Amino acid sequence: MLFENKNLSTLDASGQKLGTHVDDIRSYLVNNQVLTSLNISNNKLADEEGGKVLASGLTSNTTLTELNVSCNSWGSWERYPPLNSLNGYRFAKELASGIRTA
Protein backbone atom coordinates (compact mmCIF):
# COMPACT_ATOMS: atom_id res chain seq x y z
CA MET A 1 0.00 0.00 0.00
CA LEU A 2 1.05 3.55 -0.74
CA PHE A 3 0.94 4.63 2.91
CA GLU A 4 3.05 1.91 4.52
CA ASN A 5 6.49 3.58 4.54
CA LYS A 6 6.58 5.68 7.71
CA ASN A 7 10.05 7.10 7.01
CA LEU A 8 9.19 9.37 4.07
CA SER A 9 9.57 13.11 4.49
CA THR A 10 7.90 13.84 1.13
CA LEU A 11 5.06 11.90 -0.48
CA ASP A 12 3.40 12.65 -3.80
CA ALA A 13 0.20 10.58 -3.94
CA SER A 14 -1.52 12.77 -6.52
CA GLY A 15 -3.87 11.19 -9.03
CA GLN A 16 -4.05 7.82 -7.26
CA LYS A 17 -7.86 7.64 -6.97
CA LEU A 18 -7.73 7.77 -3.18
CA GLY A 19 -11.27 9.05 -2.66
CA THR A 20 -12.35 5.93 -0.80
CA HIS A 21 -9.08 5.68 1.15
CA VAL A 22 -9.25 8.94 3.06
CA ASP A 23 -9.04 7.04 6.37
CA ASP A 24 -5.73 5.51 5.21
CA ILE A 25 -4.41 9.04 4.65
CA ARG A 26 -5.59 10.06 8.12
CA SER A 27 -3.89 7.07 9.68
CA TYR A 28 -0.68 7.82 7.79
CA LEU A 29 -0.68 11.40 9.06
CA VAL A 30 -1.22 10.23 12.63
CA ASN A 31 1.52 7.60 12.50
CA ASN A 32 4.18 9.44 10.48
CA GLN A 33 6.14 12.05 12.41
CA VAL A 34 8.73 12.55 9.66
CA LEU A 35 6.50 13.70 6.80
CA THR A 36 6.90 17.38 5.91
CA SER A 37 5.26 17.50 2.45
CA LEU A 38 2.17 15.64 1.23
CA ASN A 39 0.56 15.98 -2.19
CA ILE A 40 -2.85 14.32 -2.33
CA SER A 41 -4.22 16.42 -5.18
CA ASN A 42 -6.50 15.04 -7.89
CA ASN A 43 -7.89 12.18 -5.78
CA LYS A 44 -11.63 12.89 -5.49
CA LEU A 45 -11.43 13.61 -1.77
CA ALA A 46 -13.52 16.80 -1.73
CA ASP A 47 -16.62 16.14 0.28
CA GLU A 48 -17.67 16.95 3.82
CA GLU A 49 -16.58 13.61 5.27
CA GLY A 50 -13.20 13.78 3.51
CA GLY A 51 -12.55 17.17 5.08
CA LYS A 52 -13.42 15.91 8.57
CA VAL A 53 -11.25 12.81 8.28
CA LEU A 54 -8.24 14.68 6.91
CA ALA A 55 -8.55 17.33 9.61
CA SER A 56 -8.45 14.67 12.32
CA GLY A 57 -5.20 13.32 10.87
CA LEU A 58 -3.66 16.75 10.47
CA THR A 59 -4.32 17.72 14.07
CA SER A 60 -2.23 14.75 15.21
CA ASN A 61 0.70 15.47 12.89
CA THR A 62 3.29 17.98 14.07
CA THR A 63 5.77 17.79 11.20
CA LEU A 64 3.75 18.48 8.05
CA THR A 65 4.43 21.94 6.62
CA GLU A 66 3.14 21.55 3.06
CA LEU A 67 -0.17 20.01 1.95
CA ASN A 68 -1.64 20.02 -1.57
CA VAL A 69 -5.33 19.10 -1.74
CA SER A 70 -6.12 20.83 -5.05
CA CYS A 71 -8.30 19.36 -7.81
CA ASN A 72 -10.22 16.94 -5.62
CA SER A 73 -13.75 17.31 -6.97
CA TRP A 74 -15.97 14.30 -7.67
CA GLY A 75 -16.36 14.14 -11.43
CA SER A 76 -16.57 16.55 -14.29
CA TRP A 77 -16.69 20.18 -13.22
CA GLU A 78 -18.39 21.09 -16.49
CA ARG A 79 -21.21 18.57 -16.02
CA TYR A 80 -21.83 19.12 -12.29
CA PRO A 81 -20.65 22.63 -11.32
CA PRO A 82 -23.15 23.23 -8.46
CA LEU A 83 -22.45 19.84 -6.86
CA ASN A 84 -18.68 20.15 -7.16
CA SER A 85 -18.75 23.70 -5.87
CA LEU A 86 -20.82 22.69 -2.84
CA ASN A 87 -18.70 19.61 -2.11
CA GLY A 88 -15.51 21.63 -2.44
CA TYR A 89 -16.87 24.25 -0.06
CA ARG A 90 -17.91 21.62 2.50
CA PHE A 91 -14.54 19.87 2.21
CA ALA A 92 -12.64 23.11 2.81
CA LYS A 93 -14.94 24.16 5.65
CA GLU A 94 -14.57 20.87 7.51
CA LEU A 95 -10.83 20.75 6.91
CA ALA A 96 -10.33 24.30 8.21
CA SER A 97 -12.74 23.81 11.11
CA GLY A 98 -11.04 20.60 12.23
CA ILE A 99 -7.60 22.16 12.12
CA ARG A 100 -8.70 25.33 13.90
CA THR A 101 -10.31 23.49 16.82
CA ALA A 102 -7.27 21.36 17.53
Image (cartoon, rainbow, N blue to C red):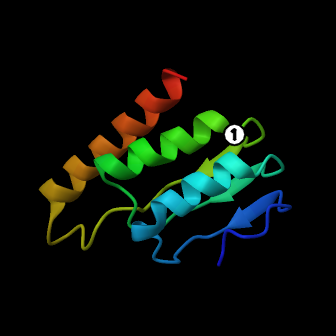
Q: As drawn, is 8 to the left or to the right of 93?
A: right
Determine whether 55 is above or below 73 in the image.
above
What residue is drawn where x is 49% and y is 58%?
Answer: 23
Task: Kindly tell me whether residue 71 is visible in this rendering.
Answer: yes
What amino acid type is highlighted by mark number 1? Asn
From the viewer's side, name the closer residue of 68 and 95: 95
Residue 53, horizontal then vertical, whole percent? 45, 47
Q: Quadrant of the N terminus?
A: bottom right
Residue 16, horizontal then vertical, whole percent? 53, 78
From the viewer's side, name the closer residue of 36 and 77: 36
Residue 36, horizontal then vertical, whole percent? 78, 48
What residue is drawn where x is 65% and y is 57%?
Answer: 28
Q: Quadrant of residue 58?
A: top right
Task: Kindly tell me whether residue 43 is visible in this rendering.
Answer: no
What residue is drawn where x is 52% and y is 39%?
Answer: 56
Residue 74, horizontal then vertical, whole percent? 29, 67
**Which residue matches tag 1?**
61
Determine whether 54 is above or below 46 in the image.
above
Residue sitting farthest toward the top: 101
Q: As drawn, is 79 to the left or to the right of 39?
A: left
Q: As drawn, is 89 to the left or to the right of 40?
A: left
Q: Label 1 crowding class (10 Å Cα cut-off): few <14, some 14-19, many 20+?
A: many
Query: In what element is the residue under mark 1?
Result: loop
From the viewer's side, name the closer residue of 81 and 21: 21
Q: Quadrant of the C terminus?
A: top right
**Count of numbered circles on the image:** 1
